[in-house]
Amino acid sequence: MTHGRPPRRPRPMATNLVNVAAMRATRLTQVELDQVINPLRDAVAALRRGVATEFEWQLAVTAVNIGDAIETQGVVRGLAGHFRSIDLALLEIGKRARSTGDWQPPALYYEERDLLDLLVDLHHHQVKSLSFGEFCKARDKAIAQTASAPGGKVVDVDQRQGVLA
């Protein structure tokens, strides 16, 4: 008899906890690192050429948000000022691109091009220094912060293109 309570449903359990712990504690493989960095490199290259879509601009903004989350996590520190500058540059790029109402990729200023190159270098340095678990935690925190911000919009990158989930 259940005394008015629903019957107990067993929770799913990982079959090999050692493998799960090892997976979350190991650094990203080169393939996984490439899945994170290559879309960012392509997006920055498109922004530099002046042919970027809004989605490619969003990828760069996402890298900044994840970089800030990694900085807050404390694994790789000392880059907050750089990410603040890059974020401001991306906001200006986005503002210029939407000045007509529709997305029109703008020409970049020299400083913005340098900051976007710096973004790729810093993000690569951060991600290769993290374990898979730390990367997932930072990514999830960036998603939560974006979703909770006023006007924040979260785009499912996995649906749009194959990026590390």
Image (cartoon, rainbow, N blue to C red):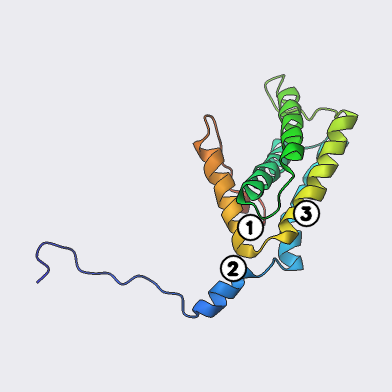
- Mark 1 lies on residue: 135
- Comes first in the chain, label 2 or label 1: 2
Residue 64 visible in this rendered orientation of the protein: yes
Seen from this angle, which residue lies furthest right?
A: 110
Left or right of 60, for residue 22? left
Quadrant in the picture for residue 155: top right
Q: Amino acid at mark 2?
A: Arg
Q: If the image is split into quadrants, where does the C terminus sit?
A: bottom right
Decide: is 127 above or below 148: below
User: Marks 1 and 3: in contact by CB < 8 Å?
Assistant: no
* Percent x, y of residue 61: 69, 39
Q: Amino acid at mark 1?
A: Phe
Going 63% across and 57% down the picture, which residue do you hit? Answer: 135
Decide: is 106 above or below 63: above
Decide: is 89 above or below 125: above
Question: Disc 2 to disc 1, how far (Cα)?
Answer: 9 Å
Label 2 SS: helix
* Percent x, y of residue 159: 60, 51
* Percent x, y of residue 103: 71, 28
Q: Nearer the viewer, residue 76 or 34?
A: 76
Q: Amino acid at mark 3?
A: His
- Mark 2 lies on residue: 24
Going 77% across and 30% down the picture, which residue do you hit? Answer: 89
Going 74% across and 26% down the picture, which residue do you hit? Answer: 92
* Percent x, y of residue 130: 68, 60
Residue 165 visible in this rendered orientation of the protein: no
Left or right of 137, for residue 76? right
Decide: is 9 above or below 105: below
Question: Disc 3 to disc 1, how far (Cα)?
Answer: 12 Å
Q: Which mark is residue 124?
A: 3
Q: Nearer the viewer, residue 1 or 122?
A: 122
Determine crowd level at label 1: few under 14, some 14-19, many 20+ residues with C-alpha closer than 10 A. Answer: many
